[in-house]
Amino acid sequence: MSRIKTLNKNSISEGIAHLKKVDADLKKILIKRQDKINPFNKTSGFEGLISLIVEQQLSVASAKAIFTRVKLLANNLTPEILMKLDDESLKSTGLSRQKISYCRNISLAAIDGTLNFEGLEKMEDDQVVNELIKIKGVGEWTAQCYLMGCMKRLDAWPSSDLGLLVAIQRIKGLEERPKSFTIEEIAEPWKPFRTIAALLLWSTYDKE
């Protein structure tokens, strides 16, 4: 197994230098922002994954409000406690019935050992994604964001994220929002620091 790379002060500096070298558009943004990128910090494990389910297809503000209510309702957000909460109580927080189902799927997987969060820490990025997407409700976007925010992996890439698509269209001067294949091609030179590229692109999407 290769050494798993994560975000830290040194790897971020190394990644910024790499992005400046391989992409003139990102270099301009990094210079303008004085190499500052907005962090994406999530609690690791069950709580972090549930928060990402809540965030699916919602604004940051809406997701934060709903997740805060979920945590207040649960008091201590564990798989066992979430399973004891009835659907109506969970729905009162703002969760849709579909997302309640997804949260229960994750809870059951964690309880029966199908999903082992400690085990994920020892896996390579693609293995983590493959394990997570086995659970109904956890798609590629959620798995990649788990790698980024919860596990601090260096080369995660949630390529379907709307914020990334809009930011790339803007900085690359594209007439249309780029398709999946185009996004992968554009991001290829950014490896193995695509997490840093994503954080930078999100920073521009949030600010401008």
Image (cartoon, grey):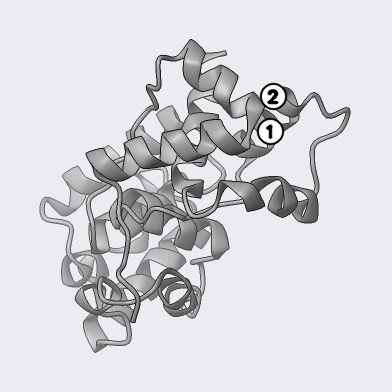
Task: Identify which residue is drawn at 36% across, 61% down.
Answer: 87
Does dot 1 land on a helix, a strand or a loop?
A: helix
The vertical placement of 10 against 204, above or below, is below
Q: Is residue 160 visible?
A: no
**Disc on res. 168:** 1
Q: Nearer the viewer, residue 208 or 153?
A: 153
Q: Position of residue 40 (x, y in %)?
A: 35, 38
Classed neighbour count for the residue bearing mark 1: other residues with Cα under 10 Å, few (<14), some (14–19), many (≥20)? many
The N terminus: image quadrant: bottom left
Q: Position of residue 12 (x, y in %)?
A: 34, 39
Residue 38 quadrant: top left
The number of numbered discs placed on residues in the rendered structure image is 2
Residue that badge 2 annotates: 171
Q: Is residue 116 visible?
A: yes
Residue at the far right in the pictured view:
175
Hey, what amino acid is under mark 2?
A: Ile
The C terminus: image quadrant: top right
Does dot 2 land on a helix, a strand or a loop?
A: helix
Task: Identify which residue is drawn at 17% across, 66% down.
Answer: 81
Task: Identify which residue is drawn at 29% across, 57% down.
Answer: 151
The vertical placement of 98 against 43, above or below, is below
> Is residue 55 rendered to the left or right of residue 26?
left
Residue 178 quadrant: top right
Residue at the far front in the pictured view:
21
Residue at the far left in the pictured view:
76
Q: Nearer the viewer, residue 107 or 98?
A: 107
Q: Are marks 1 and 2 in contact (CB under 8 Å)?
A: yes
The vertical placement of 122 against 147, above or below, is below
Task: Identify which residue is drawn at 65% across, 53% down.
Answer: 188
